[in-house]
Image (cartoon, coloured by chain):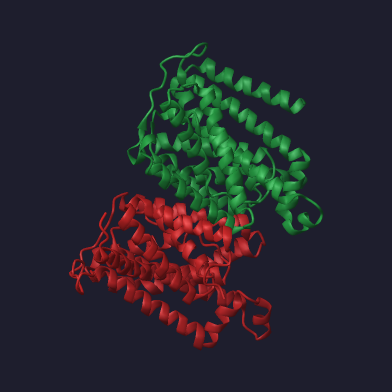
Amino acid sequence: MVFDPGLLLNAIVSGLLLGGFYALATSGLTIAFGMLDVVNIAHPTFIVLGAFATFALNQATGLDPILCCLILLPVFFLLGRGFYDVYYRFFERRGDAAIQGLAFFFGVMFVVEVSLSLIFGPNHQHVETPYAWTNLGIGPVDLPVRMLIPCAMAAVGIGAVTLFFRTTFIGRAVAAVGQDEGALRLVAIDPLKIKRLAFGLSLLLAALAGGALLVVQPVDPWAGHTFIGRVFAICILGGLASMRGSWMAALLFGVIENVTATYLGPSWSPAVAFGLLLLTLAVRPQGLFAR
Amino acid sequence: MRFYLGAVGVTALVFLAFHLAGIEYLWFTAYVVVQYVVLATAWNILGGYAGYVNFGSAAFFAVGTYAAVALHKMGIGNLWLMMAAGGVTAGLLGLAMGYLTLRLRGAYFSIATLSLAVLLQTIITNWSYLGGSRGVYVIRPSEVAVFTSFVEYLFAVMLLLALAAICIARYIEKSRLGYGLAAIRDDELAAEASGVPTLRLKLIATTVSGGLMGMAGAPMPYYSTFIEPASAFGLNYAVNAMAMPLVGGLKTWVGPLVGALMMGTAQQIATVTISSAVNLLLVGLLLIGFLMLAPQGIVGLIKGRAKR
């Protein structure tokens, strides 16, 4: 094969764009898994749930999917709070969060997926947007709006959450709760309240990622599966609790995956992604970008 | 010794009852349930005894299936050889996975097993000799000596494998190996400090558990006659292998057996009477319900009753 710099450049740029979406998909998990130590294996499925909820609202009202997604965010925030309550009461407080809790999320994942396929059918669902096929190409490089929007959503969403964590008192408490609950109690904050809030934020970000996913590609109820490995890989590569780390890991991941897909064929790209995760876990479990 | 004789006796009785019933469809359905007994028991050796949650059961199962497919392609159609190949390949895979990932604990280990499953699925999907993504047809021999039909033969073989799996599980449970694994489950650091060879024990557990799952997968080509990666690596194997011991009760060999018989039968009934999607929903809801309300499983519930 003749080396074509345009092809490689395109693969890298679209990989970066894809990485932006991955960053958004991972951000919620960074909160749940990285900060709260809740192994929410169902996170990608919540993203798919967000996509389907957006789809349903879009079909019912005819509003733009991104707007629908934004309308749904508070619902998912509340859902996350309630969900954490259940998890806390039945698993974390009992002290057997490890096996049972993990299996619980696995079960939730399964139930949500099957319910979605019973309600919407097993087919792919997608929305038509006026901007879906617009391409802001610069020279030989493609910049599809379909991919730029998720990137922008990622930048705004993750930026806002990071700002919240850095600057507000409650936000700092979220960052602290995973590290030392006792210390939090000493300054008269209820750790449970903080965790509930954080998990609400986690699902809110999942719904945002779901809206983005619907813009990027058609979604079927089982679409979460392909993302489980990716989001956990990115989260671990990024050093778990670090929002910035998971951004960088997501971009790296997107580029590697896309370059592989371009040169070896798309059917090989999961192998690279998961291989990278396995390798990271085996060699450097604390992540590439750990502090 | 009495236990093993009793187990052989019960197995023989079960086979006799099903043989006398003489319904092809019954053997066909019972095969699936018994297959889940093997999978659940195998999962429990690592997950229940040692506390390492394996999300990748489907990978071991599928590796067994594809080892059998490969052998069949080479012209070796003997079921026992196929099962041996499946068991050895999946056992080796278990050993390799153990070496690669057993330094990881808790959720990290589980996620690693899940990624291993996806990795293997990608390789198989791209491996055209084994059918690739299009799948591969395997022709079932039309008849077999002694048995009424080949399906009955498959059922009998699977029943034997279940017997073997339960005996192995019970043997491990009562041996030094089992106590070592229990120590790892309760506190790995403390176990290591008290001189339990944790890595070696865990490697034995992953190998035995993986090998049994592979053997359970090996007769699959003859059972379903069409094998393709998406269904061979199907998530319902992974979920069921984990859900059944959790519902039945971890820590003993009885739990997976009870869980698999109960949930397996319920699923088969639901598939026939309602629909296969509802059957999956049932599994998920049962799993969640049991985890929340009876964390010790059915066995735990009964034991709790007996104590009071």
Residue drawn at x 74%, y 59% as measured from the top left:
B189
Percent of width and height locating residue B111:
53, 56
Question: In the picture shown, does residue B287 fall above or below B136?
Answer: below
Residue A86, by quadrant, is bottom right
Left-right relation of A222 to B5: left
Tell me what residue is drawn at x 44 percent, y 27 percent.
Answer: B223
Image x and y of residue B205, in percent:
66, 43
A217 or A13, which is in the foreground?
A13
Q: Colour of chain A?
A: red
| Residue A291 to residue A219: above or below | below
Chain B: give its colour.
green
| Image location of residue A181, percent across then percent down | 65, 76
Q: Is residue B95 above or below residue A208?
A: above
Residue B117, given in percent of the width and then of the height, sits at 48, 48
Q: Is residue A12 above or below residue A157?
A: above
- Residue drawn where x is 42% and y is 62% of the image: A46
Q: Of B216 and A116, which appears nearest the observer? A: B216
Question: Is residue B19 at least partly visible in the picture?
Answer: yes
Check the picture and name the quadrant holding the N terminus of chain B.
top right
Relative depth, front residue between B239 and B104:
B104
